[in-house]
């Protein structure tokens, strides 16, 4: 199976993910067309199902409130949808609603707006600060996967998201229910071109943008591994928020960039045994001057003993000063490759030595 490689060390890393190695067409066994057909019915997927090469255009339910599903796999599917977002609380606002009490896996799937609205797929080579590439609010969708963010959804029993391509979302993932025994694992997946967050297009509405949102903590054993989360947004890419703990979490070998406070790992200082290693903060995407930070806070109770922040670095792709959206390619080239410490803000600069817990 493909694993993106860091250009410097040759080791797997999310910084090398792109349009050629995630999503349905990148699957090693992609048959060249959606042999599973097109489904606009909004079906309910039941326990034990494996769904391959289906083009969904009307959303999907994994189980329902009365009959939860388990052991479900989506492989090489595309979920294209522009939800009814006249009210962001509308229950048509998600590509997938999860009612799961056992493992659900998404392998090499693509989540995007309707092809009819965006016949040319945004690949990430475009600069998010170019307004011609914005995904308009009225053509976007609120959630790719909602599994604990409302509508009585739940994702108990484990989740794997592997080599998936997400774009055009307000919140790509909104989840709850990860445990050490049955963790939520998102790996080798790419999040880019979120729905318009700043009323820059033809509507007077905007999204709250996150790539992976958890609202209230009590979310344990989660793993973010080798992902690329890089959006022009107004909140967090990795948005593990709220007062509850994120014990035993692993955040390793990801590339993060853009948004506002780009990474939140435990907002309230109640987490233990959190590992954040080998991650890269990139400066390709513009942000909000004086309010942007690579990391909101390193809020753990056992820094340097049970929890570890190490080997995290900067990837500086320009020479401009930190600039308001939609400017891009900012930072000091001298910081490229230097170490990223938890307390850094957008103007701190990199460090010649790695972080050591006080």
Image (cartoon, helix red, strand yellow):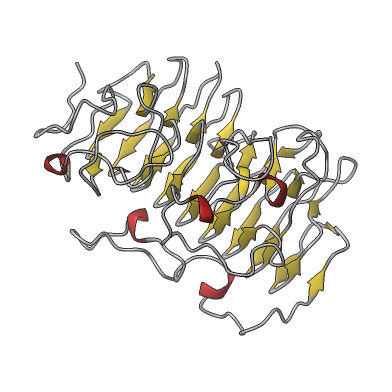
Q: Position of residue 147 (x, y in %)?
A: 70, 40
Q: Position of residue 80 (x, y in %)?
A: 70, 61
In the rendered image, which quarter contains the N terminus? bottom left
Q: Residue furthest front?
A: 202
Q: Left of 150 or right of it: where is 11?
A: left
Q: Position of residue 127 (x, y in %)?
A: 41, 54
Q: Left of 336 or right of it: where is 161?
A: right
Q: Foreground: 95 or 132?
A: 132
Q: Residue furthest left?
A: 352
| Vertical comparison of 151 with 162: above or below | above
Residue drawn 35% across and 34% down? Answer: 275
Q: Foreground: 283 or 314?
A: 283
Exactly how many numbered labels are in the figure?
Answer: 0
Q: Foreground: 184 or 141?
A: 141
Residue drawn 25% across and 23% down? Answer: 304
Q: Quadrant of residue 349?
A: top left
Q: Position of residue 165 (x, y in %)?
A: 54, 59
Residue drawn 47% across and 20% down? Answer: 267
Residue drawn 61% across and 26% down? Answer: 215
In the rendered image, which quarter contains the C terminus? top left
| Vertical comparison of 139 with 180: above or below | below
| Vertical comparison of 337 with 244: above or below | below
Q: Quadrant of residue 281?
A: top left
Q: Foreground: 72 or 141?
A: 141
Q: Quadrant of residue 218?
A: top right
């Amino acid at each position: 199976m493909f694993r993106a490689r860091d250009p410097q060390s040759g080791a797997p890393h999310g910084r090398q993910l792109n349009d050629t190695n995630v999503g349905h067409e990148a699957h090693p066994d992609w048959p060249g067309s959606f042999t599973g057909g097109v489904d606009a019915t909004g079906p309910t997927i039941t326990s034990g199902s494996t769904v391959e090469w289906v083009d969904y255009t009307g959303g999907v339910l994994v189980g329902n409130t009365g009959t939860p599903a388990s052991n479900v796999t989506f492989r090489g599917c595309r979920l294209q949808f522009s939800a009814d977002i006249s009210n962001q609380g509308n229950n048509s606002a998600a590509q997938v609603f999860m009612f799961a009490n056992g493992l659900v896996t998404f392998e090499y799937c693509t989540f995007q707006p309707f092809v009819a609205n965006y016949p040319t797929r945004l690949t990430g080579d475009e600069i998010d600060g170019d307004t011609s590439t914005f995904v308009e609010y009225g053509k976007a969708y609120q959630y790719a996967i909602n599994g604990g963010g409302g509508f009585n959804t739940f994702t108990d029993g484990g989740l794997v998201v592997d080599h998936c391509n997400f774009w055009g979302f307000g919140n790509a993932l909104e989840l709850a229910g990860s445990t050490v025994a049955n963790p939520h694992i998102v790996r080798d997946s790419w999040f880019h071109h979120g729905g318009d967050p700043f009323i820059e297009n033809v509507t007077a509405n905007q999204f709250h943008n996150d790539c992976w949102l958890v609202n209230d903590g009590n979310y344990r054993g989660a793993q973010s591994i080798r992902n690329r989360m890089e959006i022009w947004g107004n909140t967090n890419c990795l948005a593990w928020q709220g007062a509850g703990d994120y014990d035993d979490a692993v955040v390793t070998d990801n590339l993060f960039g853009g948004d506002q406070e780009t990474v939140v790992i435990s907002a309230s200082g109640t987490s233990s045994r959190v590992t954040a290693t080998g991650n890269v903060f990139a400066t390709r995407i513009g942000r909000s001057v004086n309010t942007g930070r690579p990391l909101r806070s390193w809020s753990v109770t056992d820094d340097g003993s049970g929890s570890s922040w190490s080997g995290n670095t900067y990837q500086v792709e320009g020479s401009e000063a930190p600039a308001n959206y939609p400017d891009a390619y900012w930072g000091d080239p001298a910081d490229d490759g230097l170490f990223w410490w938890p307390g850094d803000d957008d103007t701190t600069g990199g460090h010649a030595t790695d972080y050591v817990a006080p």
